[in-house]
Image (spheres, rainbow, N blue to C red):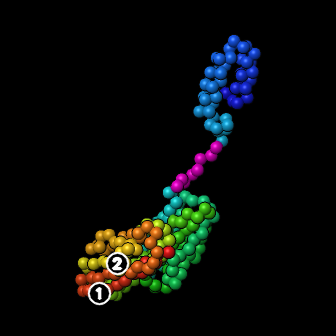
Amino acid sequence: MDCESVTVKHQQLSSRSGFIPVLILSAAVLVGLVGIVMGPGCDSSSPGVPGGPGDFFLTPNSVTLQTGQSVATFSIVGGEEPMTWAVGDPGIGSITETTGRIANYNRAGSSKGANEITCTDKIGRVARAIVAHFGPVEGLFITPERVVMTESNQVVQLTAVGGDPPYAWSVIDPSLGTLSNTDKSAVNYSRKGDAVGQNIVELKDSSSTLATATIVQE
């Protein structure tokens, strides 16, 4: 029954004064039923929102480029177009081609290290992925070697490359952030709230070779 039918029914019943109490109760029941079936305002056309909060991410979320490999392709799931793509370190790689929801990342020469890929949608949500550049390993280093954090309580994974396990990780300023799994080849660095500053993560292998990574917290 639509809103107009409810109004007509009301007018017909109102002409019989003896039925006013029944009318009030009946109208209330009818309006309640219409509200349940039709939704607000007798309008059933209210659209849903695809890809609700949290359904916005890059796939894959990490890629490793071995020696001789130079291109990685990423696609975005969810979000609102248009999308804006960017890289953290243009010196070792760049986004060379995008078609809205798909982007190609191109490694610069035989560069080593790691790069962060970001995709920002129309309303400002940011999705992230990591590309690690591997080659013949000489010495010990951490990937990524530099991270910029812009979000509260942000977490980033750091990975040991090269050297001779076992590894030992440490952080210079624990008031800015802390590490987990410090005896493993990969650790998580967790920012403490909105702490601002620059932190250094240190890595030593069994030969006491030292590698460092820089965490910038804005």
The N terminus sits in image quarter: top right
Vertical arrangement, residue 88 with respect to residue 80, above or below: below
Residue 66 shows in this picture: no
Where's residue 153, x and y in %?
43, 66
Q: Nearer the viewer, residue 56 or 151?
A: 151
Q: Nearer the viewer, residue 31 or 91?
A: 31
Where's residue 199, x and y in %?
41, 79
Q: Mark 2 vs mark 1: which is more N-terminal?
A: 2
Segment tinted magenta in the rendering: 46-53
- Name the residue located 60 percent from the left edge and 62 percent from the top edge: 123
Q: Local crowd at mark 2 within 10 Å, few (<14), some, or many (≥20)?
A: some
Where's residue 207, x and y in %?
24, 86
Q: Element at badge 1?
A: loop
Vertical arrangement, residue 10 with respect to residue 53, above or below: above
**Residue 171, numbered label:** 2
Of the residues tagged 2 and 1, which is closer to the observer? 2
Distance Cα–Cα, label 2 vs label 1: 16 Å
Q: Element at badge 2?
A: strand
- Name the residue located 35 percent from the left edge and 75 percent from the top edge: 174
Residue type at tag 2: Val
Q: Is residue 96 left or right of residue 3?
A: left
Q: Are marks 2 and 1 in contact (CB under 8 Å)?
A: no
Q: Quadrant of residue 4?
A: top right
Number of marks drawn: 2
Residue 97 shows in this picture: yes
Q: Which residue is mark 1?
A: 209
Q: Local crowd at mark 1 within 10 Å, few (<14), some, or many (≥20)?
A: some
Q: Quadrant of residue 200?
A: bottom left
Confirm whether the magenta stretch covers residue 216: no
Confirm whether the magenta stretch covers residue 50: yes
